[in-house]
Amino acid sequence: MTSRGCPYFDPEYETLLARLNPPRVVIDNVSCSDSTLIKIDSANKQGILLEVVQVLTDLDLTISKAYISSDGGWFMDVFHVTDHQGQKLTDEGVIDYIQKSLGANEDSLTTEVRTCLGRTVGLQSTVEHTAIELIGRDRPGLLSEISGVLTDMMCNVVAAEVWTHNMRVACMVYVTERLTGGPVEDVEKLARIKEQLSQVLKDEKGNSNITVYNCEEKGYSVVSVKCRDRPKLLFDTVCTLTDMQYVVFHASADSDGNYAFQEYYIRHMDGCTLNSESERQRVIKCLEAAISRRVSEGLRLELCTKDRVGLLSDVTRVFRENGLSVTRADVSTRGDKAVNVFYVTDASGNPVDMKVVDAIRKEIGLTILQVNDISHYASSKVQETSKPRFSFRDIISHSEKVLYNWGLMKSSPESL
């Protein structure tokens, strides 16, 4: 029998394009009057958009606009950013960090980014605790009911994060067995926890500001997002699409102060579009959950006291009995201390009567529960604006012409 040798493959070839064309990062404080432009050109690879957005998000920068294109093996992005005070970037340390993190001098854009998506009720045990993910329709007292179920199931809440938006809630709760202090390993108990929490949620379908459709002439699936703007929104939506194994070929993002508008042209990693209604609905639900995260509306209450079993259940019960609704919660333990932050409104979503807050503080403890109002806490609901917005279609032809002129696209944009 004649043996056939395998063709030789140079492992260095895969990174050849990146080495011949290292990333180029330009920080532009001149072209725009109210923001800094960060321009990035580099060889394209799966996940690079998320990695770039994550670097900017970790610096607590606000991205007001973004122009993204990654066809033809090349990645071209322009981000309009400001610092946490709404000003251009002037800190040389921040600018240098961006240059080094995204530029040719570092390997930061080759590391794998790990993300996680939630479901209606999901449970996963790790070495130290069990993580519970919940998504559903929000209502007053929901967090208290969830805490009550876990307390009745002999579970101790060691940490939790809760987000609400447009009457939807997303929640991550980390629990341990009360008796052992370890994760919940009993399969039957995990099933009972999931069943009871599903009953508590009683999930209802809410209004959606997300649409998904196929653009046949371009061969893309188009995801359009319209929602209230907030910090880190772009990161959360890009993270979700990346985690779901979609490739973002082109995108645009804009905000007018209150509302954000995003448009993504995506395909599966195998090049296919979203061809089933169930898949489109899955994308919509996952993006709705991502958008709900990190939204903070309400009066900020900070609790710090010695941790004990049932503390979260007792505190949220007091909130519920006094007519407060928790819009967001960050629950953690540091040693033997419970350090919790709650954002609360009344049952209708309006500002809390400070007399009610004073009564609650007296019941829980004046030194235990502190008030820290947030500047954007307001009673009025923001109405949707009719301000014209740009679309990806307004910029795609220009991006494609640039790519074609550089020899990075085989067909001219006029033929597309």
Image (cartoon, grey):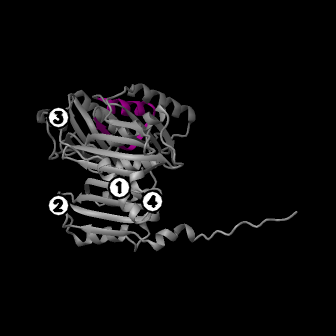
Which residue is the site of mark 2? 87
Residue 168 image offset from top left, x and y in percent: 32, 33
Front of the two marks 1 and 3? 1
Q: Is residue 109 within the magenta segment?
A: no
Amino acid at dot 4: Met
Q: What distance separates the C-alpha of mark 1 from that of mark 4? A: 16 Å
* Quarter where residue 95 is shown: bottom left
Q: In this picture, which residue range is highlighted in magenta?
A: 141-165
Helix, strand or loop at label 3? It is: loop
Is 45 in front, or is 200?
A: 45
Which residue is the site of mark 4? 409
Which residue is the site of mark 1? 68
Residue 10 image offset from top left, x and y in percent: 62, 71
Which residue is situated farthest in the right direction here? 1
Which class describes the residues within 10 Å of circle 3: few (<14), some (14-19), or many (20+)? few
Which class describes the residues within 10 Å of circle 1: few (<14), some (14-19), or many (20+)? many
N-term mark: 3 or 2 = 2
Is 238 in front, or is 222?
A: 222
